[in-house]
Image: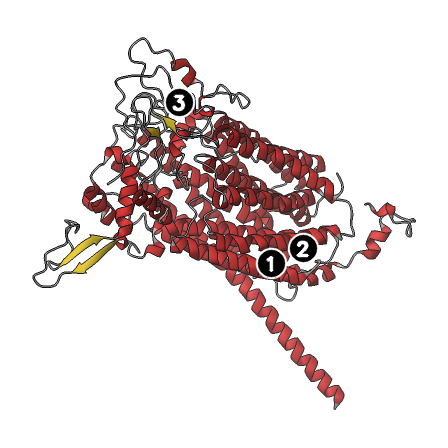
Amino acid sequence: MNSGPMVFLAAFLALAISWFGFVLAPQIQIGRQQQVELKDSGQLYPSRRPGQAAQGAAVYRANGCFYCHTEQVRPRGFGGDVARGWGGRPGKVQSVAQDYLWDQPVMLGSQRVGPDLANIGIRQTNAVWLLAHLYNPQLTSKGSSMPPYRYLFQRITLKPGQTPSDDALAVDSGSPDCEIVPTYDARALVAYLLSLRSDGTVFETPPPPAPPKSTNTPAATGTNAPASGAATNALAAPSATNSSARSAATNAPAPAPAK
Amino acid sequence: MSATSSPAQGVAVTAPEAAFAPSAACIDASCRPVLLLFLSAAAWLVASSLLGLIASLKFHSPEILADCSWLTYGRVHPGAVNGFLYGFAMQAGLGVVLWLLCHQGRATLATPTLVIAGWLLWNTGVTAGIVGILYGDSTGQEWLEMPRYGSSPMFFGYLTIAFVGLLSFHHRAKRDLSISQWFLVAALFWFPWIYITARLLLVHWQVRGVMQAVIDWWYTGNLATIWLGFIGLGASFHLIPKLANRPLHSHYLGVFIFWMLAFFGSWGGVPVAAPVPAWMPAMSAFTSMLVVVPILAVLVNIYGTLGGKCSIVMGNPLLMFMGFGAGAWLVSAILGAIGSLAGVGEITNFTWFDPARAAIALYGFFAMTMFGAIYYILPQLVPAAPPCPRLLRAHLWLSMIGIVLYAAPLAVGGVLQGMAMNDASVPFLKVVSSSLLFLRASTTGELLMVLGNVLLLLNLAGILVRAARTCITAGLSANRATAEVAS
């Protein structure tokens, strides 16, 4: 190996193996997922985000919210995510690949300076609370280290006799003739947060094995499939919806359009 | 390919090489554009560490600079990371590669003007990209946040500079390759492939769903372990023997390190509980444990090169930079291997432990190794004005103490944060407030590092000013001499 072309070949070989292993193989396995029909409601999961929520995702991305908030619930028995009530679905509650189908970009996050937001749309359905939290986190969560996003709000001086606008925040604006009004970005961001719910009961996340007629639990535990065994892996088969998972306990409607 | 194949000089094998090879001074004269890369790398280092400082001040009070959207944490933080990676680390790395490839192959820099063009493209791209991130145009993919208008010129800048490097390598007079050259040349080839793959599949034709995260992990793992690792090793394995004035301990250990890292270094980074099929995190965990072996071998090789005498290191600040770097790499590899165990990952996942480990690898290993290399190369390029030794020593100690004071509280705080977070009886706000203490402690280390970085920039600027002054005075006296002769 004493020439440049040989070094090139060596690097090429090593990189090609890693490329086939971690780019091509995952793409074949999970890159072509489709929406699946939820057995209990018949709706397609995951649904695309409504327009304003999709614009809110861009605000979330531009301001780098995902550097402090994850959007991923870890499995039961791995950390305290479930116990903290961050999960969104009954049974095995972790996030699965299917949940991120329409996210552009996918913002899993790698840090939990703040709480996980994968299901914030289920935990917190009050848009006013979310707006107030964005305007000044200390109002809603005393002691939070989240910075205030006042630049997503407008401070409008009221003319004498003018009544405050309908969407003005009920927060102290510092002066009686001023009001705080959320900008379009703030409202879009809140619409996005309200749309965050990964609660579809799909094949990989069957509901708890309620009545004894359930037969499909063993298949879904096989998340430790070997690299080659894509065929049996739950994630590889979006078409294989859970035939017997027909539990009445599922309270999983498809994501409702955020308001 | 080898020298024996040239029919004219069949007498001795090494003689024709020596006859064709330009002198070291000649090579250095051709390598002057490398100074530009070093200077702007140092400037980016200072700029990115100031952005990082702003980001970390937010943990002292969330109100600091809160009303400026450009300086919100979620923009300053990626700005700092990208400024460090692309502004400093890769730029300094490219400068070191050019100089090393020319010297090891005994060839002059092929086309210095192209290096200047590449330098312009690269810095235009990085500047546009980071302004874009601060403006809110981030792509949302970690380490690939730069918008297209930044990443494209930057990438063409890379291609230009790498082309010059490979051309100089191709024209080398000394045909035999050292292990250091393997690392450098492989790294030059490596980056375009991973960058094109990641940019095309994550930004231009975005793949679907969580595949994006998989490719992003693949890219960051490759950039950190392979590109930065190979460049750092290429520099260490060439310069440590030079500095210690002893031959490299073992070429074959180097070959072993090369193959181990090339095959197993590029699989890391997928967190234990990621929402992907389980074989991916398992593969990542397995390889991140394997990677400890070659990195341990790096230390063995360096230790052997020094003849087992660590006193040599203590006496030479440049060796200290590089020795510290290799040690830090091992620490970060071990932390990475431990963190990839399911039991430990359950605690450290999503905490400050990972940023601490990344800082040890990026700053503790790569930046420190580059500092050593830059300080070694500078006096060769500008013999008239060597770096100020006092500033150099101050930089050394500030960065060594700084990175320890930065990473240690974060790592410890991360473990405590993870344990508290996994205990659902602890309110989340309590978890936040208890980890703030460690975050604030780490700012001290960050301040020291910023100071050290400023000293590097000062030292470089001082060298250039002094060199320019010598040039001007030499020019003036030459003029006067000609004038006297003429009269």
Chain under label 1?
B
Q: Are marks 2 and 3 in contact (CB under 8 Å)?
A: no
Mark 1 — residue?
B118
State the image coordinates of residue A182 (x, y, percent, origin top left): 23, 51
Q: Residue furthest left?
A: A161
In the figure, residue A205 lies in which quadrant?
A: top left
Tell me if B248 is positioned left or right of B280 in this view. Answer: right
Kind of residue at disc 3 = Glu
Asked if B483 appears above or below B190 in the picture, the reply is below
- Colour scheme of the picture: secondary structure
Q: Earlier in the sequence, mark 1 or mark 2?
A: 1
The quarter in which the C terminus of chain B is drawn is bottom right
Q: Position of residue B448 (x, y in %)?
A: 43, 52
For badge 2, the amino acid type reads: Val
State which mark lies toward you, 3 or 1.
3
**Marker disc for residue B318:** none
Q: Secondary structure at mark 2?
A: helix
Q: The numbered mark 2 sits on a residue in which chain?
A: B
Kindly identify which residue carries mark 2: B164
Callouts 3 and 1 in the same chain: no
Report the residue at 60% width, 73% height from top.
B469
Task: Identify the subunit bearing mark 3.
Answer: A
In the image, taking residue B137 as reference, residue A117 lies left or right, namely left
Q: Residue A204 has which mark?
A: 3
In this rendering, the label closer to the viewer, 2 or 3: 3
What is the three-letter code of the residue carrying label 1?
Gly
